[in-house]
């Protein structure tokens, strides 16, 4: 009976320990989900089979998918989204597929035209566990659209400023020539007068 009682205490102790571990894991998972959902970048983790294990709504909306689909998108669909007209070239798509298959890193700026034109910095890298075993791949999308529009606006204003300076310089030179012509005309008028 004594032996049975000590076994029951051991089982109760282990059960309590497992419940605490489970509870801690759930809290850590909730914190991780909250962090991923609140980041400014689109974020997705694919498993070894190309399925999606973690994704935030921003990632889905940036590639033109419905954020309510959540994990119904596959990693192959991600690549397909970038291959739409106005997206990456077939050669770049092939390079991305090769890097993905060979556990390489993808780090490129790409344009997506659906649903609207977006300039995205695409970063993808393999994920490994502590032993170095491949366990999946992470994808991160940073929306550079507004930054590129501001840069284009700055370039346009710099061009306009350069044209304005050129026009001002030409007007100044023309004014100098005109002053010389008017001066000579005044002398001719005085001689005739």
Image (spheres, rainbow, N blue to C red):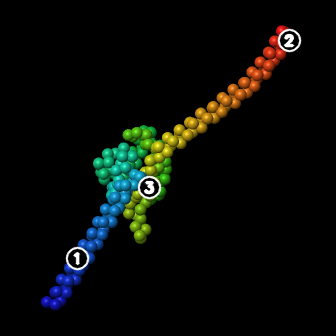
Q: Which numbered dot is residue 15?
A: 1
Where residue 114 sits in the image (x, y, percent)?
39, 40
Q: How many marks?
A: 3
Secondary structure, mark 2, is: helix
| Element type where label 3 sits in the image | strand
Which label lies toward us, 2 or 3? Answer: 2
Q: Which residue is drawn at the image coordinates 41% and 52% (left, top)?
A: 40
- Work out which quarter of the rendered image holds the C terminus and state it: top right
In this picture, residue 179 sits left or right of residue 152: right
In the drawing, what numbered circle is on residue 191?
2
Q: Which residue is mark 3?
A: 124
Residue 34, numbered label? none
Query: Residue 9 vs residue 26: left or right?
Result: left
The residue mark sitting in front, 1 or 2, is: 2
Gap in angstroms between the C-alphas marked 3 and 1 = 40 Å
Front residue of 118/99: it is: 118
- Residue 156's x, y, as percent? 56, 36
Q: CA distance from mark 1 to mark 2?
A: 119 Å
Q: Is residue 87 left or right of residue 182?
A: left
Give 186 or 150, whichever is nearer the viewer.
186
Q: Position of residue 176 (x, y in %)?
A: 75, 25
Mark 2 and mark 3: span between their CA atoms? 84 Å
How crowded is the residue under tag 1: few (<14 C-alpha within 10 Å), some, or many (20+)?
A: few
Q: Secondary structure at mark 1?
A: helix
Q: What residue lies at 18% left-to-right and 83% top-to-bottom?
A: 8
Rendered residue at 33%/66% (across/down): 28
Q: Earlier in the sequence, mark 3 or mark 1?
A: 1
- Disc with the residue nearer the chain's start (2 vs 3): 3
x, y (%) of residue 56? 35, 53
């Amino acid at each position: 009976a004594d032996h049975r009682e000590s076994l029951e205490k051991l089982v109760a102790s282990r059960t309590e320990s497992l419940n605490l571990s489970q509870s801690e894991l759930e809290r850590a998972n909730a914190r991780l989900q909250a962090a991923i959902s609140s980041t400014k970048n689109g974020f997705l983790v694919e498993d070894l089979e190309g399925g999606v294990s973690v994704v935030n709504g921003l990632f889905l909306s940036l590639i033109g998918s419905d954020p309510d689909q959540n994990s119904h998108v596959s990693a192959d669909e991600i690549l397909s989204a970038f291959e739409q007209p106005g997206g990456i070239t077939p050669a770049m798509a092939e390079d991305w597929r090769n890097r993905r298959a060979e556990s390489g890193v993808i780090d490129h700026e790409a344009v997506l035209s659906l649903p609207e034109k977006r300039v995205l910095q695409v970063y993808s890298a393999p994920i490994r566990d502590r032993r170095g075993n491949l366990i999946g791949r992470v994808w991160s999308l940073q929306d550079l659209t507004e930054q590129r529009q501001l840069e284009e606006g700055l370039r346009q204003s710099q061009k306009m400023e350069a044209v304005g300076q050129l026009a001002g310089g030409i007007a100044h030179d023309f004014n100098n020539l005109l002053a010389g012509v008017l001066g000579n005309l005044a002398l001719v008028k005085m001689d005739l007068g």
